[in-house]
Image (spheres, rainbow, N blue to C red):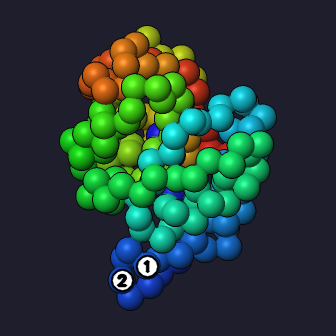
Amino acid sequence: MLIRHAKAADAPVDRDRPLAGKGKRRAAAIGSWLEAAGLLPDRVLVSPARRAAQTWDLAGEALTTDLQPVLDERIYDNTVETVLAAIGDVPDEVQTLAVVGHNPSIGELAASLDDGAGRPPALRELHAGFPTGAVAVFTVHSPLAEVELGGATLVDFAVPGA
């Protein structure tokens, strides 16, 4: 799962930007949506930016699992290559991964991961843009350590609470 952090407020330093009120509601809705869909990750990689960490903290409150996020600076680096490298370093036993990060890397990676066999409605929504608080869900056809562009199928795309 690729998740773009929820709507953030301004701050003097980008890394310190907190979630706005709307973002807090959307982050909680992400968790409720994941729980209802049965999409419970066994590992979460999160950008160390405040807005991304807050997004997962609020989303995680709605889940029946108490999963502690792994902060990864590469997610904040915000390139497709660094996010893909972080995914590739996930331990073999991880079956369901969530990544909470930023655009443009999250949106670009989501568009580049799909193998062309994704669900048409989800693909249309994804290609219309990747707004704050959006979630793209993929089935990956290889171990996460070997995931590459075009190596997954988009199965869902949602903006919970929108």
Residue placed under numbered mark 1 in the picture: 16
Residue 154 location (% of width, % of height): 48, 23
Residue placed under numbered mark 2 in the picture: 13
Left or right placement of residue 113 versus residue 31 in this view: left
Q: Residue at horizontal 72%, vertical 29%?
A: 38
Q: Residue at horizontal 38%, vertical 45%?
A: 106
Residue 4 location (% of width, % of height): 48, 51
Q: Residue at horizontal 24%, vertical 46%?
A: 82
Residue 72 location (% of width, % of height): 36, 55
Judging depth in this view, the residue of 97 and 114 nearest the camera is 97
Judging depth in this view, the residue of 85 and 25 nearest the camera is 85
Label 1 sits on a secondary structure element that is helix
Compared to residue 58, the image places residue 118 above or below, namely: above
Q: Kindly indicate whether the residue at mark 2 contacts the one at mark 1 (C-beta within 8 angstroms).
A: yes
- Mark 2 Cα-neighbour bin, 10 Å: few <14, some 14–19, many ≥20: few
Label 2 sits on a secondary structure element that is loop
Would residue 78 be visible to someone looking at this image? Answer: no
Q: CA distance from mark 1 to mark 2?
A: 5 Å
- Mark 1 Cα-neighbour bin, 10 Å: few <14, some 14–19, many ≥20: some
Judging depth in this view, the residue of 77 and 11 nearest the camera is 77
Would residue 59 be visible to someone looking at this image? Answer: yes
Residue 37 location (% of width, % of height): 72, 30
Compared to residue 71, the image places residue 38 above or below, namely: above
Q: Please identify the residue farthest to the left as the structure is shown.
A: 81
As drawn, the label of residue 89 is: none
State how many labels appear: 2
Q: Residue at horizontal 55%, vertical 46%?
A: 134
